[in-house]
Image (spheres, rainbow, N blue to C red):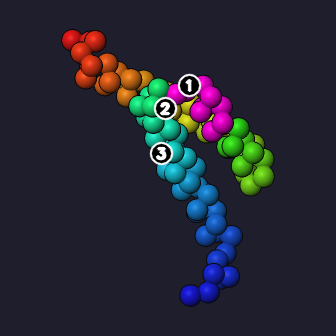
């Protein structure tokens, strides 16, 4: 199989799939792992957003900046739901 036979449409599909599925999944998992390991969620969120902004400036256009808000909400949902489940398991909320 020759890797040089990809067209621009193939790469565009990969970028769209990563914006819609891969990045939200990564932000969700990062929120969950931040809650499980009790790390600073703002530090991990800042690093992720900085990396996404660099990626956006190099490979994407400015319209991808709207996805940052969606990713923020997804990471917050992952973090807060995991913290809530941990509080229930520890018996702090009945």
Give the residue pinned by disc 3.
25
Quadrant showing the C terminus = top left
Q: Estimate the spatial distance between the alpha carbons at disc 3 and disc 1, rounded to whole Å.
A: 19 Å
- Image coordinates of residue 39 in percent, x first then y, are 52, 28
Give the residue pinned by disc 1.
40
Q: Are marks 1 and 2 in contact (CB under 8 Å)?
A: yes
Q: Estimate the spatial distance between the alpha carbons at disc 1 and disc 2, rounded to whole Å.
A: 7 Å
Give the residue drawn at x 68%, y 82%.
4
Give the residue drawn at x 49%, y 32%.
34
Q: Secondary structure at mark 1?
A: loop
Give the residue drawn at x 58%, y 49%.
19
For residue 34, the mark is: 2
Give the residue drawn at x 60%, y 32%.
45
| Residue 8 appears in the rendering | yes
Magenta span covers which residues? Answer: 39-49
- Image coordinates of residue 25 in percent, x first then y, are 47, 45
Q: Secondary structure at mark 3?
A: helix
| Residue 77 appears in the rendering | no
Name the foreground residue: 36 vs 24: 36
Q: Secondary structure at mark 2?
A: helix
Crowding around mark 3 (Cα neighbors within 10 Å: few <14, some 14 to 19, many 20+) is some
């Amino acid at each position: 199989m020759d890797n040089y036979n990809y067209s621009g449409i193939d790469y565009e599909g990969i970028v769209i799939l990563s914006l819609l599925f891969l990045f939200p999944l990564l932000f969700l998992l990062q929120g969950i792992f931040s809650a499980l390991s009790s790390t600073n969620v703002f530090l991990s969120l800042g690093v992720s957003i900085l990396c996404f902004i660099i990626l956006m400036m190099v490979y994407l256009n400015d319209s991808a900046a709207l996805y940052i808000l969606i990713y923020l909400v997804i990471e917050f949902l992952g973090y807060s739901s995991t913290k809530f489940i941990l509080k229930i398991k520890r018996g702090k909320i009945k």
